[in-house]
Amino acid sequence: NPLNFSGVWRFRSLFPYASDEQIVTLGEGQTLLQQTDRVGQYVGLDSGKLHLQYEGMNPSGSFKDNGMTAAFTHAHIVGAKRAACASTGNTSASLAMYCSVTQLMKAVIFIGSGKISYGKLSQALDYGALTLQISGDFDDAMARVKEVTKDLGIYLVNSVNPFRLEGQKSVMFRVLEALRWEPPDWIVVPGGNLGNSSAFGKAFAELKELGLITRIPRLAVINAAGADTLDQLYNNHNLRWNGGRFDQKVIDGYYKNMDETGAKASTLASAIEINRPVNLTKCLRALHDCDGVVRQVNDQEIMDAKSQVGAGGMGCEPASAASVAGAKMLREEGVIAPSDRVVCILTGHLLKDPNATVAYHTTDQDYFNQVLGSRGVKRAAHANR
Ligand code: F0G
């Protein structure tokens, strides 16, 4: 069966909502779990303990294809002719690709003004999506697309869509498969809209219930400093899942304060420049089920970790490197032990955001100033060459 070539749909018995004939696949999920000692050493782990899951190997260059094939399939089943998303760039690239290759739907994309890397924007444009830049940031675009899709009956593919999360569970199925179904000690993942972390928690809870695993790995969700709503609410306001009876007042108060101060998300990891994560409460559940922790890492830590992933692996985009920077932080704190087996999820391809990478490595002061100068990030130490 050709569906077995998809790294998502070969696990379809674990999310059975579409018949084989209904499934729309572009061969997504053929990704790689790789053990790397060089990056492991940077994180502070013993030899053989760090694995990187390269989700940038997906057809549109990010993990989003895992969820998009699932949501797109559902959109097709219900007869949608248009599908929309707000995006920091990867969701839009993925949606636009599924639309252009299949010609089944038209893509409508909302992006914040000046908030998208050119690698990602170029994908949406070349794939022919209707690409709308709105005044405001991702959180504004997300609010807008929710209204517009409701008013106009357009299918919404952001990760509020539960089918997205069903597809993204497969990232964990593949990680476990590569580890011969022996769960690692830690899964470390960047946190933006918190779809991945929510999907991963759901995957583990279900696998345990089915008796396919006996132990659930611990989950570490890593925010970027400047886009740290989850970290603030989890660590400073002690917000917990509590059987679904989480304290809504804490969340409402936090957002009200954000509205009053006009605080906007700000990080050079533009993919996760998000202050109002739509899957916040689902992620709280995942953190509960997976004995999770949350941390934030700053732009410098992200760029330094990213260059290490390049120098010791296949590379990744800035947001993805938050996982490696977060693992290093947790190792230094002693939360992760040197002998723990750790899997960091690299969510997007190195080529997604070339400007940040070139600026980090360049000796051209003007270019550095233009791209990174305002962010207080220092250039590569080049000590690793
Ligand atoms: N890493 C990358 C490369 C991303 O593009 C995103 C999200 C995340 C991490 C965060 O994942 O939302 O599951 O916590 N990008 C979205 C987009 C918001 O529009 O492409 P999450």
Image (cartoon, rainbow, N blue to C red):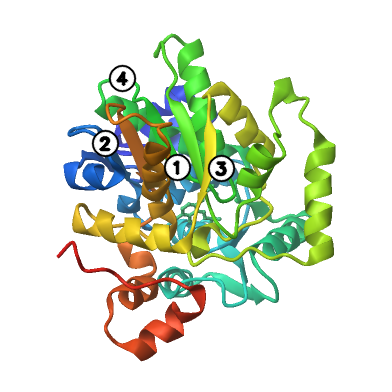
Q: Which residue is mark 4?
A: 181
Q: CA distance from mark 2 to mark 4?
A: 21 Å
Badge nearest the viewer, 2 or 1: 2
Q: Earlier along the polypeptide chain: callout 3 or callout 4? A: 4
The tag on residue 45 is 2
Q: Residue at x 57, y 63 (%)?
A: 106
Numbered disc 3: secondary structure: helix
Question: Label 1's element?
Answer: strand
Q: Label 3, on which residue?
A: 195
Residue 370's image quarter? bottom left
Q: Amino acid at mark 3?
A: Gly
Lateral position of residue 193 relative to residue 270, left or right = right
The amino acid type found where label 4 is placed reads Trp
Specify the amino acid type for callout 1: Val
Label 2 or label 4, whichever lies nearer to me, is: 2
Q: Is mark 1 within 8 Å of ligand 1?
A: yes
Mark 3–mark 4 Cα distance, whole angstroms, equals: 23 Å
Relative placement, left or right, of 329 versus 307 is right
Decide if residue 343 is on the left or right side of residue 129. Answer: left
Distance between the alpha carbons at the discs numbered 2 and 1: 17 Å
Looking at the image, is 348 positioned above or below residue 117?
above
x, y percentage for residue 5?
28, 37
Q: CA distance from mark 4 to mark 1?
A: 19 Å
Give yes or no for contact between labels 3 and 2 (Cβ–Cβ under 8 Å): no
Mark 3 against mark 1, which lies toward the viewer?
Answer: 1
- Regarding residue 16, the answer to whether it shows in the image is no
Quadrant for the C terminus, please: bottom left
**How many residues crowd around disc 3 within 10 Å: few (fewer than 14), some, or many (20 or more)?**
many
Name which of mark 3 and mark 2 comes first in the sequence.
Answer: 2
